Image: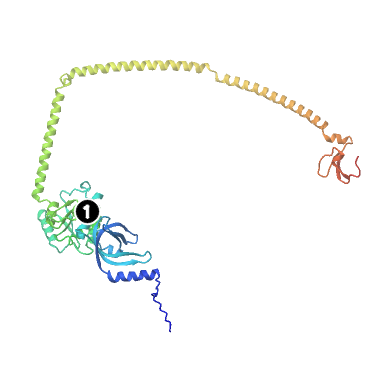
């Protein structure tokens, strides 16, 4: 009987981590290449490269997201934590960490258009910085002679502006800086126009204007660069953008907001009649102030006239003259007393100077100095003589006690080989070398015998 052996165990396939990650990445890319996901943004941060990283979450889950710089720059608003959004993109795996994440291509706020959300976001941020503060806004000139227009040269707004400005004040000088008022690059050209006028200082006031349109049409006037250029302007700016119901960031930052371009022209230039009325009001106000000032000074004059000093001017003058005489007499007496005192002091000092014989004083001091000099010299010579005598005695004593005198008498000093003075025969042995110091000369001997 033939024996058959069956291997029922399945063949085992071992994946590497990279192979598994790549397989998962391919599956996600195949099935989730274009999806929309709604959630709340958290942990958002912008890298130095310009890429934007954040987490999209709901109540039960979360997923990492990344928006690369080229997509992130196209967004009209800036994502921030807590914002509820819908994102569009594809899902893939970041292999070094094994994380799956959404590569975001588009973001829009939920319940609010992207443009409107960007508008509210920028408005809130600039308001917090104080760009809308009325205290920083400049007053319009009363009668501008040169007006700058920043608008499109082809729209109806520029025609209305020029027509109204010419009609209200015919001699005004108008300078038009043509710019596109919508579309790509419009904001940059508006900023360039504002920079040009502020650099040249060629106008007294600026009007930034365009006709009405949708929020997207007016978006160039909602750009942050335009808002900051208006805030930095040293020339007063009137914003006349859109219709009466339209509001832009430009309106909030500008020094004056006009509901329409035509209203902006009417705000900038008064009519001749309004100007004459203003002059008449100033003249009337000046006359009233002058009348009030005259009445005030008249009242003060009457008050002074009623004072008793004006009723008795001769008497007051006499008293003043008499008081002057008294003061003059007191001053003269005081001066005479001070002069007499000074004269007495001078006489006493002169007497003392005359009594003082400077020549005899010098002679006396010279004799005193010579006497003391002789005494000092005598004392020094005596001290030197005493010191020399004592030195001679000490020298004689030292010579009498010198070991050399002992050697002169026939004595000698013996030293061992180390130079030590020998005082006993026990300090050397037979055969040692011994040095003997005589009065004149040194002997070196060998010990033959000791006792």
What is the crowding at mark 1: few (fewer than 14 residues within 10 Å), some, or many (at least 20)? many
Determine the residue positioned at 15% across, 50% down: 143
Q: Is residue 236 visible?
A: no
- Residue 321 appears in view: yes
Q: Quadrant of residue 244?
A: bottom left
Q: If the image is split into quadrants, where does the C terminus sit?
A: top right
Quadrant showing the N terminus: bottom left
Say left or right for 271 vs 333: left
For this rendering, which residue is in front, 301 or 64? 64
Residue at 14% x, 31% y: name it.
296
The image shows residue 381, relative to residue 64, as above or below, that is: above
What is the x, y in percent for residue 160?
11, 59
41 vs 3: above or below: above
**Apparent side of residue 225 relative to residue 384 in the rendered image (left or right):** left
Residue 358 point in image, percent of width and height:
55, 20
Question: Among all residues in the image, which is located at the extreme left?
Answer: 273
Q: Position of residue 428 (x, y in %)?
A: 86, 42
Residue designated by label 1: 123
Residue 313 drawn above or below residue 1: above
Where on the picture, by quarter, is residue 152?
A: bottom left
Depth order, front residue of 78/64: 64
For residue 325, what is the image quadrant?
Answer: top left
The residue tagged with tag 1: helix, strand or loop? Answer: helix
């Amino acid at each position: 009987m033939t024996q058959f052996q069956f291997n029922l165990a399945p063949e085992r396939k071992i994946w590497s981590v990279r192979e598994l990650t790549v397989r998962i990445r391919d599956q996600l890319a195949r099935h989730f290449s274009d999806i929309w996901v709604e959630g709340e943004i958290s942990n958002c941060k912008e890298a130095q490269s310009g890429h934007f990283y954040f987490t999209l979450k709901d109540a039960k889950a979360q997923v990492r997201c990344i928006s690369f710089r080229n997509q992130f720059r196209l967004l009209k608003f800036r994502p921030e934590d807590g914002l509820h959004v819908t994102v569009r993109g594809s899902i893939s795996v970041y292999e070094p960490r094994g994380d799956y994440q959404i590569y975001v291509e588009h973001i829009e706020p939920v319940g609010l258009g992207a443009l409107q959300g960007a508008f509210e976001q920028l408005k809130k941020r600039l308001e917090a910085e104080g760009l809308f503060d009325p205290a920083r806004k400049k007053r319009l000139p009363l009668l501008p002679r040169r007006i700058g227009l920043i608008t499109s040269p082809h729209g109806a707004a520029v025609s209305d502006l020029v027509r109204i400005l010419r009609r209200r004040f015919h001699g005004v000088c108008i300078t038009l800086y043509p710019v596109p008022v919508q579309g790509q690059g419009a904001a940059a050209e508006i900023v360039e126009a504002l920079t040009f006028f502020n650099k040249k200082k060629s106008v007294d006031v600026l009007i930034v204007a365009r006709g009405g349109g949708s929020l997207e049409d007016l978006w160039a006037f909602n750009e942050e660069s335009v808002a900051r250029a208006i805030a930095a302007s040293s020339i007063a700016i009137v914003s006349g953008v859109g219709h009466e119901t339209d509001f832009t960031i430009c309106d909030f930052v500008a020094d004056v907001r006009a509901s329409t371009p035509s209203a902006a022209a009417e705000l900038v230039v008064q009519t001749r009649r309004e100007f004459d009325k203003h002059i008449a009001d100033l003249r009337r106000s000046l006359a009233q102030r002058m009348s009030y000032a005259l009445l005030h000074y008249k009242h003060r004059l009457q008050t002074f006239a009623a004072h008793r000093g004006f009723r008795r001017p001769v008497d007051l003058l006499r008293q003043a003259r008499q008081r002057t005489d008294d003061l003059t007499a007191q001053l003269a007496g005081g001066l005479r007393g001070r002069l007499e005192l000074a004269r007495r002091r001078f006489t006493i000092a002169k007497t003392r100077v005359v009594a003082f014989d400077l020549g005899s004083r010098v002679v006396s001091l010279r004799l005193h100095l010579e006497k003391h000099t002789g005494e000092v010299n005598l004392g020094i010579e005596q001290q030197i003589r005493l010191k020399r005598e004592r030195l001679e005695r000490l020298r004689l004593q030292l010579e009498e006690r010198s070991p050399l005198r002992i050697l002169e008498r026939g004595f000698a000093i013996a030293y061992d080989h180390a130079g030590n003075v020998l005082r006993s025969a026990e300090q050397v042995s037979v055969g040692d070398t011994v040095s003997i110091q005589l009065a004149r000369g040194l002997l070196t001997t060998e010990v033959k015998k000791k006792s």
